[in-house]
Image (spheres, grey):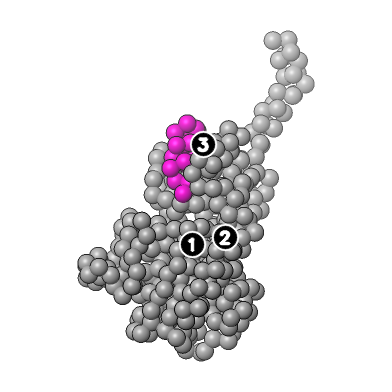
Amino acid sequence: MKLKSLLIGLGLVAGLSTAQAEDPFKVGFVYVGPVGDHGWSYEHNRGREELEKHFGGKVKTTYVENVSEGADSERVITQLAKSGNDLIFTTSFGYMNPTIKVAKRFKKTTFEHATGYKRSKNVGTYTLRTYEGRYVSGIAAGMMTKTNKLGYIASFPIPEVIRDINSVYMAAKTVNPDVEMKIVWVNTWYDPGKETDAANALMDQGVDVLLQHTDSPAPLIAAEKRGVRGIGQASDMSHFGPNAHIFSVRDDWAPYYISTTEAVMNGTYKPQDFWGGFKDDMLSIASINDNLPADVKTKIQTTYDDIRSGKFHPFTGPIMSNEGKLVIEAGHTLTDAELAQVNWYVEGIKDSIPN
C-alpha cells in the first residue's frame, strides 16, 4: 500500500495506465507463399503495409510467409495467438480448418480467414469476386487468340478455382464460339518451375493465350519468350511480359484490412462472409497493354463496366454443366453461398474435375 501511495503521489500510476492504453493493437498475417511471389501473397502483404500506414503507431503487424496448408499452419496460427495478436488474418483456403481449431482455444482473439466458408463467434471469412476478373479475362482471351486454344494453369480443384475456370470459358465463348480451353493442374499455389513447365506444355499443344490461378509470373515470362499472350494474376505483372501481357487482374486487400481492424478495435466487429469485387475497388483491371487492338480495349472496358455496375453477372442462368445437367435455372443468379460450392464445369469444357 505504501508503494502504491508513493506511485500515486509521483503521478506514475496514471502514467503507467496511459502507457498500457496506448499499446499498439496487434495484427498477425499468415501467407501461403513468399511476399515476393509477385501475386497473391505479395498483394496481401501490400495490404498489410497499407494497414500499418493508415493507423500509424496504433497498429503493429507481423507476418509469417511460406506456411504450408495443414498442420504447419495450425502451429503458426497458434503461435501468433499466443504472441498476443488481437486479430489474425489467415490468407489461404487450406488454412480454414486450422483457423477454426485455433479460434476455439483463443476465444478473445478475432480470426479472419480468406476464401473459406466456415465461421464462428470469433471467425469471419472474406474473399474476392475473382470470377469477375476472370470473365473480363475470358473476353480478352477469346478475342486475342488466333489458334482458338486457351490454356489455364490451375492450382487446386476448390470452388474458387473451378468457378473461375468456368467464368473464363463462358466469357470467351460469347466472343469466339470456336474457342477451346485446355487445363493443367499443378497442385501448388506457387512453384515457378511447375508453372513454367505447365505453360510450355500448353503452348506445345497450340495454346496462344495463357491464364493462371497460380501466383508467380512464370507463365507470363514463358509466354513472352515464345511470342504468345498472357494475363497476370493477383498483381500487376506487366513488367514481366511487356509484349505478351494483355492486362492483369489486380487484388487490393487494403480496404478490407483497414475496415476490419477498425471494427475490431472499436468493438463493432461481427463475423460475416465478405465478398469484395469491382464495385468495392478491391479488384481491378491493371495495365491494359497499348498493343491491343482498339475493339479489344473497348470490349474489356464495357465488360468491366457492366459487371461493376451490376448490369451483368457471369453466373446467371440458364447454365448447363458439361455433364448435361441444368446447374443454374433461367433467370437465377447464384448467391454467394452457391458460388462458394461450385463443383461443376460448364457445358463445352472437355475435361473432368480432379478428385
| Mark carried by residue 191 | 2
Return the x and y of residue 343 as percentages of the image width and height: 32, 59
Front position in the image: 4 or 178 = 178
Q: Residue 235's image quarter?
A: bottom right
- Location of mark 3 (residue): 109
**What range of the chain is rendered magenta?**
94-110
Residue 279 lies, in percent from the top left, at 45, 66
Q: Can I make out residue 286 in this image?
A: no
How far apart are labels 1 and 2 at the CA level? Answer: 9 Å
Q: Which of 118 and 195 is in front in this view?
A: 195
Task: Find out whether residue 106 is within the magenta segment.
Answer: yes
Please state which amino acid type lies under the numbered disc 3.
Thr
Mark 1 touches mark 2? (CB < 8 Å):
yes
The amino acid beneath tag 1 is Val
Tell me, for residue 186, which label it has, or none: 1
Residue visible at 40% across and 40% down? Answer: 120
> In the rendering, at what x and y percent does residue 82 appear?
58, 33
Look at 50% across and 73% down and name the residue there. 201
Q: How crowded is mark 1: few (under 14 residues within 10 Å), some or many (20 or more)?
A: some
Q: Name the quadrant of the C terminus.
A: bottom left
